[in-house]
Image (spheres, rainbow, N blue to C red):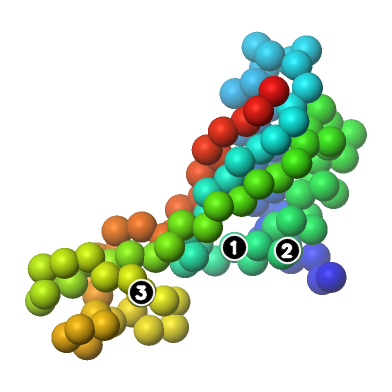
Amino acid sequence: MWLNMHEISVCQSILAILEKRLEHNSEKKVKIIHLAIGELSGIELDALRFAFPIVMQHTRFETATLKITVIPALGFCENCNKSVKISSAFRCCSDCKKPISKLIQGDELLIKEVEL
């Protein structure tokens, strides 16, 4: 597996956020970290799963399990006045074929929950 620098820095950012948010619970062991990642986030999930334990080594998160939920990409078609599923390769309305100008969801990266 090739290490992608982007996913390494994403994991480093996750680590920094977790350390800051959990500083008052420093004695508790972290069991599971739940992430929600949008289909259009640009994050390669396999590379993230590979980088995560490497970045978390020698921290209190090194034994934590990473759980990822993928958020589907949705856009709003102004022509049809409705939400439609889109893909990274083809951002057009499936009904009218007009370009989607507004992304509703699918580009996010969220730390949804941390189980202690």
How many neighbours does mark 2 have within 10 angstroms: few (below 14), some (14-19), or many (20 or more)?
Answer: some
Q: CA distance from mark 3 to mark 2?
A: 23 Å
- In the rendered structure, which disc, 3 or 2, sits on the residue that comes first in sequence? 2
Q: 66 or 91: which is nearer to us?
A: 66
Tell me which numbered mark, 3 or 1, is placed earlier along the sequence.
1
Task: Determine whether 25 is above or below 50 in the image.
Answer: above
Numbered badge on residue 86: 3
Name the residue furthest right. Answer: 58
Residue 38 on image: x %, y %: 48, 59
Q: Mark 2 near mark 1, Cβ–Cβ under 8 Å?
A: yes
Q: Residue at x 82, y 71 (%)?
A: 2
Q: How many marks?
A: 3
Which quadrant of the structure image shows residue 84?
bottom left
Residue extending farthest bottom: 97
- Percent coordinates x, y for residue 5 in the rendering: 73, 62
Name the residue rendered at 33%, 79% in the picture. 91
Q: Give 44 or 10, whichever is nearer the viewer.
A: 44
Kind of residue sitting beneath label 2: Ala
Q: Is residue 20 visible?
A: no
**Which of the labelled discs sits on residue 43, or is there none?**
1
Label 1: how many Cα within 10 Å (few below 14, some 14–19, many 20+): some
Disc 2 secondary structure class:
helix
Q: Amino acid at mark 1?
A: Ile
Q: Is residue 70 visible?
A: yes
Vertical relation: 58 (above or below) 8 = above
Image quadrant for the C terminus?
top right
Left or right: where 37 falls relative to 86:
right
- Drawn side of residue 85 relative to residue 53, left or right: left
